[in-house]
Image (cartoon, helix red, strand yellow):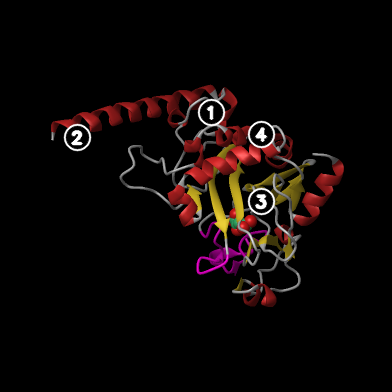
Amino acid sequence: MNDQEKYLFDLRGYLVVKNALSSTQVRALSDTFERDSQALEAGWAGSDRYHYDPNSEFAWSCSSLLEYGGPYIDLIDLPSIVPYLEALLGPHYRLDHDYLKVDRTGPTRRPLYLHGGGQGAGRERDLVGPHDGGQCYYRYNNDRMYNGLVSVAFELKSIKPGDGGFACIAGSHKANFGLPEEWRFQESQENMHECVDRVAVDAGDAIIFTEACAHGTVPWQGDKERWTIFYKYCPHAVAWAPCYYNSDNYEGLSERQKSMLMPPSAYGPHEETRAIWARVQNEQVELKRLRVKERERS
Ligand SMILES: O=C(O)CCC(=O)C(=O)O
């Protein structure tokens, strides 16, 4: 992350990384999603943080884009994004949750709902974390930036000005006053306040933003659809999703990717913590084995 990018991120709370994905990656990610007809129809895949299937075999493990494997595993620790995450979160951080959403016109079109907004300004009206105890922060000290939650939005299709998509109030990650409530919700683009920046990007670009910046989705009115993959990262000591990853559930992870999927703790990817979670994960394997046996018996 160069000095210009640091300046802009600190000033505005977001940054566009051009060509974060190659065209081959965009195609592979899109083709994989397209084959999942149920998710395509729903316009949604992955875990966010509320979607938990109580019939799931694994404790904590809500569905995740990582189950698609291949190009979705590569996104966890993507070389074009790593320098930004290191500058914004420090050398160690974890992937907290992921999802893919489709924005389209028609009855499923989402209204603008601005959320986030510096220094806990959103308070209980805030979607990011009404009980986060101030963890949705942005601050700068000791010559570096600190963030409670950083989102990487990978755009799989180009977004023209006026289509809709990501929007934010640039600079609001440092705001001291709460967002005026009358600007928070809008059903259509016409009534959005002019202080809301709309961000047009090309397929393969990534928008990196701090969740402390008041942000949301502009109601879609493009001719085509918007397909966006979100990977959300936080310091090791912080957790947003109530469901954690279990790295045993996914194939072909590097050691670094495994450490980024570890459940939260201030120790991070420390030897002791690894040992604790390795034991928990082994017990999950045993639990699964016993469940299958029980099912076969009954
Ligand atoms: O549609 C977008 O890019 C914004 C998504 C959003 O509001 C979020 O990730 O919290």
The Cα–Cα distance between marks 1 and 2, rounded to whole angstroms, is: 31 Å
Question: Which region of the structure is painted magenta?
Answer: 105-130
Give how far across and how far down residue 260 sits, in percent: 57, 33
For the question of whether residue 293 can be seen, the reply is yes
Q: Earlier in the sequence, mark 3 or mark 1?
A: 3
- What residue is shown with label 1? 258
- What residue is shown with label 4? 78
Does the Cβ of the disc 4 residue fall within 8 Å of ligand 1?
no
Prevailing secondary structure class for the magenta stretch in the rendered image: loop
Which of the image's four quarters has the C terminus? Answer: top left
- What residue is shown with label 2? 295
Give how far across and how far down residue 239 sits, in percent: 52, 45
Q: Earlier in the sequence, mark 4 or mark 2?
A: 4
Q: Secondary structure at mark 3?
A: loop
Could you tell whether 114 is left or right of 68 in the image? right
Q: Quadrant of residue 288?
A: top left
Does the Cβ of the disc 1 residue fall within 8 Å of ligand 1?
no
Neighbor class of circle 4 (other Cα within 10 Å; few <14, some 14-19, many 20+) is few
Under mark 3, the amino acid is Lys
Q: Earlier in the sequence, mark 2 or mark 3?
A: 3
